Amino acid sequence: MLLRMPPRIKVLEAVASVADGRVSRQGEVYRVVSSAGEVRVYTVKINDSKVESDDNGTVYRGYVGYPIIAALMVEGRLQYDARIGESLKGIPWKKLNDQYKNYATVEGIAKQKAAAFGVTSEEIDKYVDLVLGELRALKLEKS
């Protein structure tokens, strides 16, 4: 089954998780710690175009979840922008998503935080478009 493209905010969650140092590789498996901390740890497996992850987006909604995107950034298969990642470090994504239940609102909050680091909304939009284009070209399937 081909996985669908994720909501745009998932690219930002992924780049922030890499910047936060929440993505590690253990053999053939990636471990991605949630922004809520060790409360939730996702397991990601990547085998060429076949991927597996236990995050809600991948399991229940059929799109490429942010843990997969983050692992692909660490692998170098998706572009990682350290400047954008640093500007988004420390954002409590889970808490904000639960609180606002609106990805556009949370993306706005993230863009405000990034602006304080000199990263413009336009730079973020351009980066998200780039990563989604790269992701689309990978044609990832759920294993």
Image (cartoon, helix red, strand yellow):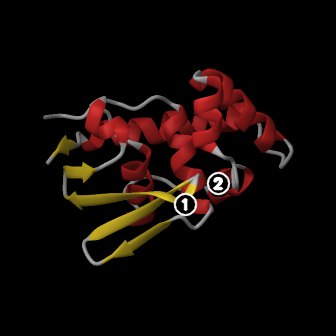
Relative placement, left or right, of 97 versus 56 is: right
Q: Residue drawn at (51%, 33%), measured in percent from left and top?
A: 129
| Residues at circles 2 and 1 in contact by the CB criterion of under 8 Å | yes
Three-letter residue code for mark 2: Gly
Q: In the rendered structure, which amino acid carries the disc numbered 1? A: Val
Q: Is residue 7 left or right of residue 35?
A: left
- Residue 85 image label: 2
Residue 106 in which image quadrant:
top right
Q: Secondary structure at mark 1?
A: helix
Residue 25 lies in what quarter of the image? bottom left
Residue denoted by label 1: 18
Q: Is residue 13 left or right of residue 28?
A: right
Q: Which mark is residue 126?
A: none
**Of the image marks 2 and 1, the number of the one nearer the N terminus:** 1
| Residue 90, quarter of the rendered image | bottom right
Residue that lies at the very extreme toward the bottom in this rendered image? 27
Compared to residue 20, the image places residue 134 above or below, namely above
Residue that appears at 64% across and 54% down: 85
Placement of the N terminus among the 4 image quadrants: top left
- Residue occupying image coordinates x 31% and y 29%: 61
Count neighbours of disc 1 (C-alpha within 10 A) and say few if under 14, some if 14 to 19, many if 20 or more.
many
Judging depth in this view, the residue of 21 and 74 nearest the camera is 21
* x and y, in percent, of residue 34 in the image: 51, 54
